[in-house]
Image: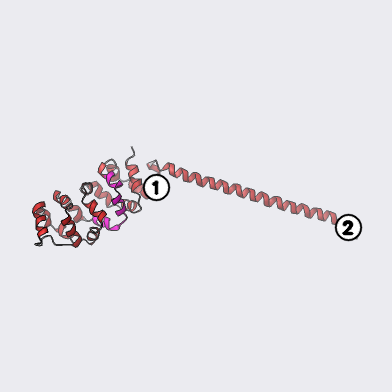
């Protein structure tokens, strides 16, 4: 008993020291963890801020548009006012997310017809727009069609294989029911770009289509305006 009494106090003291050491360890670990999380959080914020700042430099462009910026076609078109006007056009930006637009814009028949100056003029005619939307045969004896042919003198291309192919383009017929496309289709800006070989090559590239379908036209416009 005497021995147990003598050992009781050292044992209690030892247990108390062990408990105290455990509390210190837990406290220290929690503080270090908080500091570590704080450091990570600050690093993440810095990374976000750095990305925003770096977007001002073409070398650090978002991945979605970086491939486009490196193409010779984009570099050559970057300062073209018509190209910049197209990139900032709201209708074009909204339509660019529609795969139908790219099916039409890259259709060889569509591009070939823009070589005829009368085709761009014809695109402004509501009668012609209605005929395309319906896939109507423009050689029919309809009075409006006859007036259209007489006034715009499109006999030079209306009989071409390209025109006949375009009349059966389902994507175009669907887009002709879209008021935004009709407005853009009738614009001189769109016609100028369709006659631009550099733009046509750029439009045929998957990187350019993907960037615009991802609604990155604003980013492309930003870099197009950079010195």
Q: In the image, which disc is placed on residue 30?
A: none
SS assignment at label 2: helix
Tell me residue 224's x, y (percent): 32, 42
Q: Is residue 173 visible?
A: yes
What residue is shown at x 39% (from left), y 41% (from top)?
Answer: 57
- Residue closest to the eye, 20 or 123: 123
Of residues 49 and 174, the one nearer the viewer is 174
Residue at the image position 43 percent from the left and 44 percent from the top: 52
Q: Residue furthest top?
A: 227
Could you tell me which residue is drawn at 18 percent across and 59 percent down? 130
The residue labelled by disc 2 is 5
Q: Give above or below for 167 relative to 75.
A: below
Please provide the residue range marked out in magenta: 83-104
- How many C-alpha atoms fall within 10 Å of the one at disc 2: few (<14), some, or many (≥20)? few
Q: Main secondary structure of the magenta part?
A: helix
Q: As drawn, is 36 to the left or to the right of 160?
A: right
Residue 84 counted in the magenta span? yes
Residue 132's x, y, as percent? 18, 59
Q: Nearer the viewer, residue 217 or 146?
A: 146
Asked whether residue 94 is drawn in magenta, I would say yes
Q: Which residue is mark 1?
A: 62
Q: Is residue 166 visible?
A: no
């Amino acid at each position: 008993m005497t021995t147990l009494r003598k050992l009781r106090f050292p044992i209690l003291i030892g247990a108390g020291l062990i408990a105290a050491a455990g509390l210190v360890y837990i406290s220290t670990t929690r503080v270090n963890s908080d500091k570590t999380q704080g450091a990570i959080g600050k690093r993440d914020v810095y990374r976000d801020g750095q990305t925003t700042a770096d977007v001002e430099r073409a070398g650090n462009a978002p991945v979605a548009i970086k491939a486009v910026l490196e193409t010779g076609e984009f570099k050559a078109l970057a300062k073209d006012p018509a190209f910049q006007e197209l990139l900032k056009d709201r209708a074009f930006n909204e339509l660019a997310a529609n795969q139908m637009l790219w099916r039409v814009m890259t259709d060889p028949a569509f591009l070939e017809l823009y070589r005829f100056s009368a085709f761009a003029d014809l695109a402004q005619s509501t009668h012609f727009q209605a005929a395309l939307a319906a896939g109507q045969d423009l050689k029919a004896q309809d009075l409006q069609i006859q007036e259209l042919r007489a006034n715009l003198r499109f006999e030079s291309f209306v009989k071409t294989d390209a025109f006949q192919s375009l009349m059966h383009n389902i994507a175009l017929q669907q887009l002709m029911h879209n008021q935004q496309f009709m407005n853009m289709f009738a614009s001189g800006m769109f016609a100028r770009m369709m006659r631009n070989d550099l733009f046509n090559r750029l439009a045929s590239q998957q990187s350019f289509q993907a960037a615009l379908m991802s609604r990155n036209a604003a980013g492309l416009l930003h870099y197009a305006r950079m010195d």
